[in-house]
Amino acid sequence: MKNIILIGSTGSIGTQTVDIVNGHSDLFQITALGAGKNVELMKQQILSLKHKPKFLSVELEEDKKKLEVWLGEKGLDAKVYFGLDGLTKIVEQADGDIFLGALLGAKCIHPTLAAIKKKMRIALANKEIIVAAGPVVLKEVEKYQTEVLPVDSEPSAIFQCLQGNKQKQIKELILTCSGGPFRTFTKEEMKNVTVEQALKHPTWNMGKMITLDSATLVNKGRELIEAVRLFSMRPEQVKIVIHPQSIVHSGVKYTDESEILQVGPHNMRIPIQYALSYPERIEKVPEVDYFDLVKIGRFDFEQPDMERFPALRLAYKSLDMDGTATAVFNAAAETATAAFLEKQIKFMMMPEFIEAALDAHRTVKNPSLDQILQADKWARDFVDEKIKGGLE
Ligand SMILES: NC(=O)c1ccc[n+]([C@@H]2O[C@H](COP(=O)([O-])OP(=O)(O)OC[C@H]3O[C@@H](n4cnc5c(N)ncnc54)[C@H](OP(=O)(O)O)[C@@H]3O)[C@@H](O)[C@H]2O)c1
């Protein structure tokens, strides 16, 4: 039985993780659950789980108190915490073999570092922490001799295609990208797209922020940085390919010119489950449909257009700037995306704000975690100010 600590349980990745644990309660149990404000869903999750978690954390103190009363009424026993500190505490205190951090944004970093110190496997959904603080996080992974397994479908596909092969035989990584809802739009047409249009992802059903980040290709920019860092590649070794069907999830080209690609339904439960069961493959859960290549019929591939989707170019630029620049890319993108979601700025202003932040930033090379967190805060404040003033 593997013990799982899951934070962000009420979100898109979190709920799918609970499905997997419920489908394989002989293999997995959740020992700690962390969520934000959706306490009603968290209660349903607790009731659905065969083995009840002993540590819980919610965002607000008032919800912690209500949850304690509810647990008492149900005759359940669990220690409850609140706030971001609460998430770190449940990681420190619960029994855990695998940590799955499905929180949004760079705020997942402290619970993740706590899990690394406990030598837990890190099932990595939250690529933001590798983008913002990859070298620091990966140094800790090495120090505590633990492992990072990607949960995101594309890096998971790469990880799967690497099995049984040698690092020195890799020529390139193939990172596929659906192209998002505006793949065929002109730059002019993209100027006035709405939040509602941007939230209609053509293939994947995901949380709001990652769906918006897929529309700007910020998400692919983050995956590029994540792939460079997790798989020790040079940026030019990661080839981004637009693939509108989202059936080929990514792959690896080897020195003999063979490409191994991972193919399957676009259902996040597959890569999540693999990150939990690795090195084993286990039976699919009922929420994953039978996959039939004949029904898919065809695969298409295109070049990405960095002019219409400047976020990709900016991700390469931040990698080139190195040091704290990728933290700035990440934080500026998080802030601009949240402002677009709130309808404070237009779609094409998101990459403009990211670029303005990168241009104004003085990169610190080989940064400490504190310097990364400072750069993260600086970029959020910088973009907030620009949003208030409008981009001159
Ligand atoms: N969704 C996908 O298919 C997908 C695919 C690949 C990678 N990812 C990555 O996985 C991560 C999670 O994405 P998601 O789409 O699952 O996000 P999401 O649906 O927005 O869920 C976010 C989760 O974080 C919780 N949360 C937010 N702020 C919190 C806080 N201050 N304290 C405690 N909990 C907090 C939310 O709680 P409440 O809802 O209870 O407030 C929710 O459980 C992101 O890093 C994303 O890039 C997602």
Image (spheres, rainbow, N blue to C red):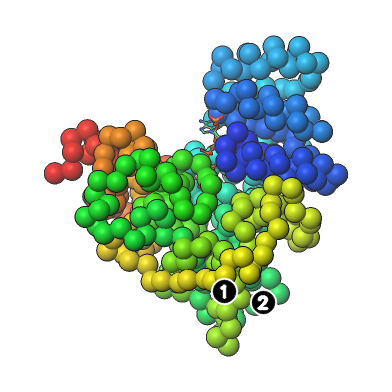
Count of numbered circles in the view: 2
Q: Which mark is residue 131?
A: none
Mark 1 sits on what residue? 252
Q: Residue at x 26, y 39 (%)?
A: 345
Residue at 32 percent of width and 42 percent of height: 194
Q: Nearer the viewer, residue 313 or 267?
A: 267
Please give left or right for residue 377 compared with residue 47 in the image.
left
Q: Is residue 380 left or right of residue 202?
A: left
Q: What residue lies at 24% left-to-right and 49% top-to-bottom?
A: 191
Q: Name the quadrant containing residue 264.
A: bottom right
x and y, in percent, of residue 192 in the image: 25, 46
Label 2, label 1: how far apart the Cα atoms are: 10 Å
Q: Quadrant of ligand 1?
A: top right
Residue 165: numbered disc: 2
Amino acid at circle 2: Asn
Q: Secondary structure at mark 1?
A: strand
| Residue at horizontal 35 percent and vertical 40 percent from the top | 195
* Position in image of residue 138 (x %, y %): 56, 56
Q: Earlier in the sequence, mark 2 or mark 1?
A: 2
Quarter that holds the C terminus = top left
Q: Nearer the viewer, residue 255 or 230?
A: 255
Tell me the quarter of the picture where residue 20 sits.
Answer: top right
Q: Is residue 351 shown left or right of residue 209?
A: left
Classify mark 1: residues with Cα within 10 Å, few (<14), some (14-19) or many (20+).
Answer: many
Residue 40 point in image, percent of width and height: 62, 22
Do labels 2 and 1 touch, CB within 8 Å? yes
